[in-house]
Image (spheres, rainbow, N blue to C red):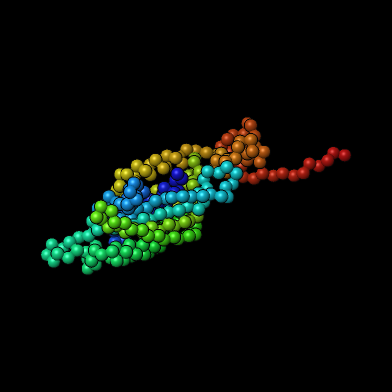
Amino acid sequence: MSLTRIAARLAAVYALRGKTLVGDNVLDSQIGALDVTADGELRTDEEKPFISVYADAAKSEENMLRSWTDNGATDFLFEMGVTSAHVVTDPETGESAVYPGIPGTDAAFEFLLDVVARQIGDTLSDPENEWAEIFRKFHMGNAVIERARTSGDGSGIRLAAQQIKLTVTLMQDPVRGRDLRPESPMALFFAKAATESDPVLNAQVALMQAQIAGSATDWQTELRRYGITKTEGENLLIVPPDGVEGDIAIVEVGAAPVVPVS
């Protein structure tokens, strides 16, 4: 799992919390939020309507040499669900509703999920939402947006669910040992995360930062970025010759044809 995938997913989760009809019930990679039983029944253990965000399949096809920093096309899944167990009954009127004024019918379930799906797009496009802005900075455009729905009626509980699959071209991972530029997406993510009073997020960020901490010279960074062997680096004049101090940056390589001796 790349650090950029983690950061982008978390940014999407925090961007959506409190911004849709599901309120704060936006889950990070909640395994089993939507599940299929051995009998083929769709089920969920969530006690109220929810969104669950996942970083799913990814494919990098244009790697430079042996690079592990390239993320390529990456799928982000937004799964939404609502069940008849989420319907609330007004004790005074006896009327059941999935949302104030909207009865708990199958049509209402689909309507609710359609609205939530729209709210996801609106939220992740909101220029005033700092988390959404960070999420957008981690990728270079929405390559594909796919939508799907499903429903079930197991154990007397009706359930409706929708999924949005967003395929993006994700930015490369930062290289270990190289300081982040303050304006880089990862640096902005770390800075924004520091403003959240969430001990789990704080622990996650500390572990992520440890993966890119350390020091490296320019030539070491380039070898790591592209997966170049040290021998290849020497042949390409990236690795300094023996005896040259390792912390001296190579700023220019000059080469000229050998003049034949007459």
Residue nearest the observer in this picture, 72 or 206: 72
Q: x, y percentage for residue 168? A: 48, 56
Closest to the observer, 170 or 148: 148
Residue drawn at 47 percent across, 56 percent down: 167
Place of residue 63 in the rendered image (x, y in percent of width and height, measured from the top left) = 57, 47
Q: Quadrant of the N terminus?
A: top left
Report the side of 156 relative to 10 (left or right): left
Q: How many marks?
A: 0
Residue most toward the right? Answer: 262
Residue furthest to the top in view is 243
Residue at x 50% of width, y 55% of height: 169
Asked whether, in this view, residue 201 is left or right of residue 250, the answer is: left
How far from the left and from the top, in percent, is residue 158?
Answer: 27, 58
Q: Nearer the viewer, residue 207 or 111?
A: 111
Q: Residue furthest left?
A: 92
In this image, 34 relative to 63: left or right?
Answer: left
Query: Residue at coordinates 66% horizontally, 44% vertically from top-left?
Result: 253
Furthest toward the bottom, the residue is: 101
Q: Is residue 192 visible?
A: no
Quadrant in which the C terminus is drawn: top right
Vertical comparison of 109 with 208: above or below: below
Residue at 39% x, 62% y is 121
Asked where in the image residue 79 lies, by quadrant, the reply is bottom left
Residue 10, visible in the rendered structure: yes
| Residue 159 in picture, x, y percent from top left | 29, 57
